[in-house]
Image: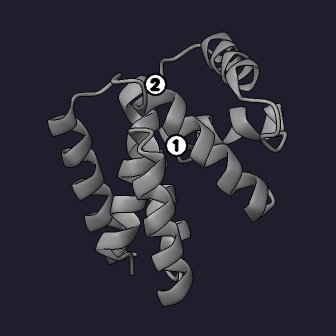
């Protein structure tokens, strides 16, 4: 089950509030990260479904992944482009099979969330609603 700190962690990550994010990360290191992968997956699902749907051409997803990879800062762990495309497609089409290393999936999910939700791409109220919906979903899993 995700905690309010985990939701705050994602919020501060998306809003590039690095100081608050570092404080929350230190707190989570103390209390534990149990439930974070589930929450991250739920936020990823809702973020992807804000941007894409089952009618989105594969080429649009390929361009998004290429742009996202190009925009990542030096020093960011490399992500597998094919895995990223597969995870995005799986978020909009439950019939897509995924067999992706959990660490790679987590890196991809984090980068996709940032690419879709950061830089004021989504209003604060919309971000809060998405995070609340994701936390509710994560608590049911």
Q: Could you tell whether 100 is left or right of 6 in the image?
A: right
Q: Residues within 10 Å of mark 1 (few under 14, many from 20)?
A: many
In front of the other: 118 or 53: 118
Q: CA distance from mark 2 to mark 1?
A: 9 Å
Which of the two residues, 86 or 110, is positioned nearer the viewer here?
110
Specify the label residue 49 is tagged with. Answer: none
Task: Say whether residue 84 is left or right of residue 33.
Answer: right
Does dot 1 land on a helix, a strand or a loop?
helix
Task: Residue at the far front: name it.
Answer: 19
- Residue 93 seen: no
- Residue at the bottom extreme, as displayed: 31
| Image location of residue 79, percent across then percent down | 80, 40
From this viewpoint, which residue is outermost toward the left?
A: 125
Q: Which residue is mark 2?
A: 52
At 76% across and 61% down in the image, what residue appears? Answer: 103
Q: Give the number of callouts.
A: 2
Q: Residue at coordinates 50% horizontally, 40% vertically from top-left?
A: 113
- When asked about the image quadrant of residue 15, the answer is top left
Quarter of the image containing the N terminus? bottom left
> Nearer the N terminus, badge 2 or badge 1?
2
Assess whether mark 1 and mark 2 are in contact (beta carbons under 8 angstroms).
yes
Residue beneath label 1, please?
91
Q: Residue at x 53, y 47 (%)?
A: 94
Where is residue 104? Give x, y as percent. Answer: 77, 53
Locate residue 117 relative to residue 73 in the image: left or right: left
When the figure is inspected, residue 62 is found, relative to residue 53, above or below; the finding is above
Q: Position of residue 126 (x, y in %)?
A: 20, 36
Observer able to see residue 68: yes
- The vertical placement of 118 against 108, above or below, is above
In-image side of 80 versus 45 (left or right): right
Residue 121, quarter of the rendered image = top left
Residue ID at (45%, 53%): 19
């Amino acid at each position: 089950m995700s905690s309010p700190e985990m939701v705050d962690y994602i919020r501060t990550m998306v809003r590039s509030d690095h100081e608050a994010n570092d404080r929350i990360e230190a707190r989570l290191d103390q209390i534990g990260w149990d439930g974070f992968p589930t929450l991250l997956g739920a936020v990823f699902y809702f973020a992807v479904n804000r941007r894409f749907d089952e009618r989105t051409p594969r080429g649009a997803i390929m361009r998004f992944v290429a742009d996202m990879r190009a925009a990542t800062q030096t020093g960011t762990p490399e992500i597998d482009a094919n895995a990223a495309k597969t995870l995005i497609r799986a978020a909009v089409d439950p019939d897509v099979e995924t067999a992706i290393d959990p660490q790679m999936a987590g890196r991809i999910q984090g980068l996709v969330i940032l690419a879709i939700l950061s830089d004021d791409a989504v209003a604060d109220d919309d971000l809060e609603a998405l995070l609340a919906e994701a936390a509710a979903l994560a608590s049911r899993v």
